Amino acid sequence: MSEKDAITKEYMQDKETFADAFNFLLYDGKQVIRPEQLRPLDTTSIVLPYGEDSKLVPIQKYRDVLKMVTAMEDDKAAYLLLGIENQSEIHYAMPVRKMLYDAIQYVAQVDEAAKSHRIGDKAPETRAEFLSGFYKTDRILPVITLTLFFGADEWTAPKDLHGMLSADADILRFVDNYHLHLIAPAEINDSDFSKFHTELSLALKFIKKSNNKNKLKEMINEDTSFRSVSKKTADLVNIVTKSNLRYDDREESVDMCKAIQGIRDDALAEGRAEGRAEGEAKGRAEGEAKGRAEGEAKGFMNAMISLVKDGILTISDAARRLNMTEAEFEAKAGLTEE
């Protein structure tokens, strides 16, 4: 499991955050699902109150996060299975993946109902109940899966099964569609973030603006909520956006303004260091070039002096080749009389 997958899974396990996400999805932010109504389900199995004489029956879990909500309606308990699939990257086959996960849950519930009847006292009343193992009065729990995208880009993948199919409209009329229930930061209007009631809103706002550092800094400076953010939220956005935020790991809360400023300070320090290194390298390079030029000039001068002393060149020829006057050449060559 990648670091992104691990931290998003842990973050959404929190009951308050989990309820907040589903209240946004299902009830436009109204606090219908309460955290205390949620029961976390085991990573390998869960127990549900249905079957023969309400016996508890286990079914297997296949989700990133899966919880059961128990809500009282008209003095009766209503049960609902809620699952979250966290995505740090766009998944172009997500409708099929979601459809499979939900189907597995429904199949498991039907199978477990049949098992409970086999070990129960109530015999099937009809041949149809006997063959299917599922009785006419049996009911299974609704399953709702939320895909939560922890990326700054828009979700460009299909949002329903029909979007993945290659078929004309006449054929698609006979193909049941399966829709993706999606929360993607880039697709949330800025005014709608107030419909969240936990720091999930801050995390999603940060992710949405993370592709534009100027807008991100402006938002954090203006929104006082970012002055004190829990470390778990700071860790989440730091990892999923690769922001390299600077804050003290020992603190329970993080001032995101200072954390963002830390990025800027580090960038300036890095820029100064690079500038110094570049300047030193340039200085060395220029010094070496100057030394080579001076060495070549001195070597050419010595060669001219040697040729003059050997009688191969005249003082006039040597001076001309060195772009000097005869007097200058004689002075540099030490040929002038004392």
Image (cartoon, grey):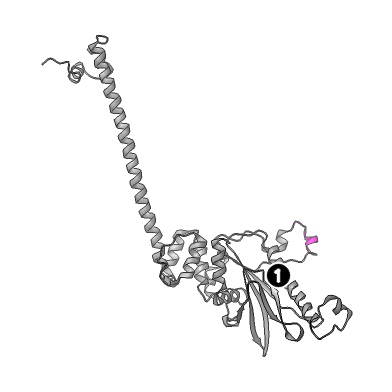
Name of the residue lying farthest toward the bottom: 75
Callout 1: 10 Å neighbours few (<14), some, many (20+)? many
Q: In which quarter of the image is residue 302?
A: top left
Q: Provide residue 301's location: percent of width, then percent of height.
A: 26, 20
- Helix, strand or loop at label 1? It is helix
Q: Tell me: residue 168, above or below residue 52.
A: above
| Image coordinates for residue 247, horizontal then vertical, percent | 41, 65
Please determine whether, in this image, residue 10 is positioned above or below residue 316.
Answer: below
Instruction: Give how far across and how far down residue 52 sits, in percent.
Output: 77, 84
Q: Where is residue 211 in the image (x, y as percent from the top left)?
A: 50, 58
Quarter of the picture containing the N terminus is: bottom right
Amino acid type at image mark 1: Asp
Q: Let me know if residue 169 is in the magenta part.
A: yes
Question: As rendered, which of 281 and 251 lies closer to the eye?
Answer: 251
118 left or right of 319 in image: right
130 part of magenta stretch: no
Q: In this view, does 176 lie above or below 284?
A: below
Camera-nearest residue between 237 and 1? 1
The residue lying toward the viewer, choosing from 101 and 159, is 101
Side (left or right) of 189 relative to 278: right
Q: How many marks?
A: 1
Q: What stretch is highlighted in magenta?
A: 166-172
Task: Name the residue: 73% across, 85% down.
Answer: 54
The residue lying furthest to the right in this view is: 127
Q: Residue at x 86, y 78 (%)?
A: 130
Which residue is label 1 attached to?
Answer: 102
Image quarter of residue 329: top left
Is residue 111 shown left or right of residue 25?
Answer: right
